[in-house]
Image (cartoon, rainbow, N blue to C red):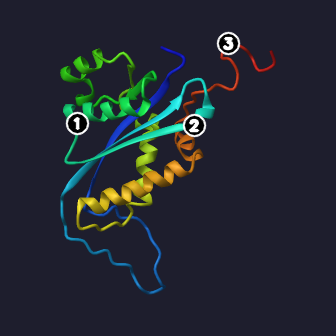
């Protein structure tokens, strides 16, 4: 693995016009009511959260993609094209789960042509190791909580506000990584004891 690369975690999530029900406040004795149209329209979002492997001062970087419907291989290649532009010629080690579209024949053929990209796979059934899962949790518990939008554009707007909130707080993406228990920058060289 190239030691001067971005370690980028990728994940997808779905949202719909059905509200994400969360606890909220209201005046005493007045139960809050959430009215929506039972609209089942769905959208998907992909997040790529990157940390530089050797320089923590470069900060975390978040690349985000939103689309109606769900992702297939072609949609994920479109996301990776966006990631390629986002990291402009820098090396990327992409860490992702075992979703079949991530490892399809067409995806492997596309990746084989990319000299900037190396793929790594998360262990099976280990979403707790992906900091992007915490990004989704943050969005769904804040901007998307109790949102009863009439159109997917309402959900997209709220999601964009959440992405801006997360980008405005540079420590927040690092907290997502810390919560996984993973580290990118060891405090001391791994082959030396602290007292050496």
> Pointer 1: what residue?
75
Q: Quadrant of residue 10?
A: top left
Q: How far apart, in angstroms, are the residues tagged by discs 2 and 1?
A: 27 Å
Q: Is residue 189 visible?
A: yes
Query: Is 69 displayed left or right of 126 in the figure?
Result: left
Residue that appears at 48% across and 27% down: 7
Question: Residue 89, percent across and down?
Answer: 43, 23
Q: Nearer the viewer, mark 3 or mark 1?
A: 1
Q: Earlier in the sequence, mark 3 or mark 1?
A: 1
> Pointer 2: what residue?
59
**Rendered view: 147 above or below 74:** below
Q: Earlier in the sequence, mark 2 or mark 3?
A: 2
Residue that appears at 30% across and 68% down: 148
**Residue 191 - label:** 3
**Rendered view: 104 above or below 65:** above
Q: Quadrant of the C terminus?
A: top right
Q: How far apart, in angstroms, are the residues tagged by discs 3 and 1?
A: 42 Å
Q: Quadrant of residue 75?
A: top left
Could you say which is closer to the camera, residue 81 or residue 104?
Answer: 81
The residue carrying pointer 1 sits among few (fewer than 14), some (14 to 19) or many (20 or more) residues within 10 Å by Cα, namely some
**Rendered view: 25 above or below 181:** below
Task: Report if the CB atoms under discs 2 and 1 are less than 8 Å apart.
Answer: no
Task: Report if the CB atoms under discs 3 and 1 are less than 8 Å apart.
Answer: no
Query: Is 105 displayed left or right of 102 in the figure?
Result: left
**Residue 35 - label:** none
Helix, strand or loop status at disc 3: loop
Question: Residue 25, percent across and down?
Answer: 47, 75
Residue that appears at 52% across and 32% down: 51
């Amino acid at each position: 693995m190239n030691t001067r690369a971005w370690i980028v975690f990728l994940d997808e999530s779905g949202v719909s016009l059905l509200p994400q029900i969360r606890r909220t406040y209201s005046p005493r004795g007045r139960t809050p009511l959430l009215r929506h149209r039972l609209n089942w329209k769905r959208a998907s979002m992909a997040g790529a959260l990157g940390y530089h492997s050797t320089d923590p001062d470069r900060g975390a970087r978040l690349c985000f993609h939103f689309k109606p419907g769900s992702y297939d291989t072609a949609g994920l290649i479109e996301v990776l094209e966006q990631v390629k532009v986002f990291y402009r010629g820098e090396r990327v080690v992409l860490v992702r789960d075992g979703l079949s579209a991530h490892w399809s024949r067409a995806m492997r053929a596309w990746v084989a042509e990319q000299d900037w990209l190396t793929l790594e796979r998360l262990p099976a059934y280990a979403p707790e190791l992906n900091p992007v899962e915490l990004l989704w949790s943050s969005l769904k518990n804040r901007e998307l909580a109790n949102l009863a939008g009439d159109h997917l554009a309402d959900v997209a707007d709220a999601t964009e506000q959440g992405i801006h909130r997360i980008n405005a707080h540079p420590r927040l993406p690092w907290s997502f990584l810390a919560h996984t228990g993973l580290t990118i920058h060891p405090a001391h060289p791994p082959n030396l004891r602290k007292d050496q």
